[in-house]
Image (cartoon, grey):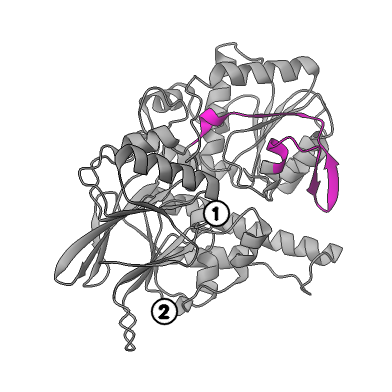
């Protein structure tokens, strides 16, 4: 019997890993085994610790990974899977592979730094504390990535084939249509990965033009539910952003923006540039502090054909951010440290986006205690992350084993979201040409998933379930 099993992003947002086994018959034959996504658990400790656990089947018995997009909660466990013996291929779209080439080694670097930190401070139960994987191990596994274009059907075994269709979430992001041949029939299942903004009304966060692909007709739908309980503000983000920046400058403070280094940072930079060029904010210095930032800009510009007309127009008008006056890209640690000495108002964009690690920790440690400063969140903050703690209005947050007082102003601009909200998800589901037999909701906190389940079953009359961690589902 073919089955699907949820090995991650069930009961939580992060750690996406969905296993398909084509014919586990219990008689020694294990079938062809594919992981759709292979992400890191981030956020709450009880989930993060699962990054150290083996998955229920040996990694060497997995035949392939099909990856929806480059975000770490979908891709960040791939180097660990290799470390545990996986020797198959990782299939992804060309932009996703380029982005992983930057994001995965950086993740390895952060793991190593964290282990070094714990060893220095003696703050780990494990002696020595080890990284989940190293920069080198992450780099090494990249040669097993194989590009697959959108719309191309790829046969991986006699019974298993798949096709990427646009998800409209971030650069290169896809949904996976899986086709299984069994019991003499061909069955179609759809894994959404993360669903981008659906083009209804005004969705000002939308930069990637296409998707999610309409008129889908899977038997089983596995869909994300990150914003299953929310509606994003529909108004243009620019006036609010300009206002926040102007007021910070008037106070003599600086703006710190924790942002995913690849794509999200570039999107933000173009908006800031436009606000400056149209005199909506003063021309204050902008520091982009991430070791990956320069490479990330190049990838962003390389795939500009994936963007909306508006985003493309900005790129055409202003060219490469690497050449803009007043914008400084800090690649080295020394360049990064220099930003600490900047006393006049400036904008610092730094990763990681959920403040789980990276150079943004140093900037926040220095600037959070000063009420003149402003922190702006432009991305989802998973519960349990420092980002979520700061965003929720806590008075202090733990950084490098120290309790850092939060007196800076905190804002979150939800318009930047790359995830469809409830209304947009429903709008997309209404385009389906066939009602799925069952829809499983993944990639959401329990509350969000439950509300979305209610909304879909009451408005569309669909059979919807909230996926549970390690739950197995028989595939026809
Ligand atoms: Zn994502």
Q: Which residue is mark 2?
A: 61
Report x, y in % for residue 69: 43, 51
How crowded pointer 2 is (Cα within 10 Å; few <14, some 14-19, many 20+) is rated as some
Where residue 46 sits, quadrant-wise, is bottom right
Give the CA distance from mark 1 to mark 2.
Answer: 26 Å
For mark 2, give the secondary structure.
Answer: helix
Tag shown at residue 162? none
Residue 251, above or below 414 = above
Say which residue label 1 marks. Answer: 12
Quarter of the image for the C terminus: give it: bottom left
**Residue 197 visible at all:** no
Task: Report the residue that reaches farthest toward the bottom.
Answer: 27
Indicate the position of residue 134 as horizontal and vertical percent values. 63, 66
Q: Is residue 312 magenta?
A: no
Determine whether the residue tagged by mark 1 lies in a helix, strand or loop.
Answer: loop
Query: 414 and 427: which one is in front?
Result: 427
Residue bounds of the magenta highlight: 389-417
């Amino acid at each position: 019997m073919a089955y699907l099993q949820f090995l991650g992003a069930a009961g939580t947002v992060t750690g996406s890993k969905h296993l398909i086994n084509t014919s586990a018959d219990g008689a020694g034959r294990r079938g062809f085994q594919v992981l759709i996504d292979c992400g890191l658990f981030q956020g709450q400790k009880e989930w993060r610790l699962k990054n150290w656990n083996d998955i229920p089947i040996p990694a060497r018995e997995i035949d392939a990974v099909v990856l929806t997009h480059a975000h770490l909660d979908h891709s960040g466990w791939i180097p660990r899977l290799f470390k545990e013996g996986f020797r198959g291929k990782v299939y992804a779209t060309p932009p996703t592979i380029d982005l992983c080439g930057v994001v995965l080694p950086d993740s390895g670097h952060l793991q190593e730094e964290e282990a070094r930190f714990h060893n220095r401070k003696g703050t780990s139960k494990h002696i020595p504390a080890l990284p989940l994987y190293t920069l080198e191990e992450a780099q090494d596994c990249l040669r097993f990535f194989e590009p697959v274009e959108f719309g191309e059907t790829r046969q991986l075994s006699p019974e298993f084939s798949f096709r990427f269709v646009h998800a409209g979430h971030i650069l290169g992001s896809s949904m996976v249509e899986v086709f299984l041949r069994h019991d003499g029939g061909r069955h179609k299942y759809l894994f959404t990965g993360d669903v981008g903004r659906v083009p209804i009304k005004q969705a000002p966060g939308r930069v990637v033009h296409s998707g999610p692909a309409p008129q889908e007709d899977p038997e089983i739908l596995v869909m994300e539910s990150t914003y299953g309980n929310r509606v994003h503000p529909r108004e243009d983000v620019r006036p609010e952003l300009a206002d926040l920046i102007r007021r910070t400058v008037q106070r003599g403070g600086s703006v710190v923006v924790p942002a995913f280094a690849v794509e999200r940072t570039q999107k933000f930079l173009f908006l800031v540039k436009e606000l400056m060029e149209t005199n909506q904010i003063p021309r204050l210095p902008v520091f982009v502090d991430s070791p990956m930032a320069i490479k990330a800009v190049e990838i962003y510009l390389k795939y500009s054909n994936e963007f909306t007309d508006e985003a493309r127009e900005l790129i055409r008008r202003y060219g490469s951010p690497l050449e803009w006056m007043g914008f400084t890209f800090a690649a080295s640690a020394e360049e990064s440290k220099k930003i600490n000495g900047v006393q006049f108002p400036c904008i610092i964009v730094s990763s990681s986006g959920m403040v789980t690690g990276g150079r943004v920790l140093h900037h926040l440690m220095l600037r959070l205690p000063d009420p003149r400063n402003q922190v702006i969140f432009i991305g989802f903050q998973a519960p349990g992350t420092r980002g979520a703690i700061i965003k929720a209005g806590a008075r202090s947050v733990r950084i490098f084993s120290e309790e850092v007082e939060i007196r800076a102003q905190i804002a979150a601009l939800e318009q930047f979201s790359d995830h469809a909200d409830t209304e947009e998800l429903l709008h997309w589901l209404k385009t389906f040409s066939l009602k799925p037999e069952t829809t499983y909701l993944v990639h959401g906190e329990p509350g969000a998933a439950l509300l979305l389940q209610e909304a879909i079953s009451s408005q569309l009359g669909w059979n919807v379930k909230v996926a549970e961690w390690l739950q197995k589902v028989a595939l026809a």
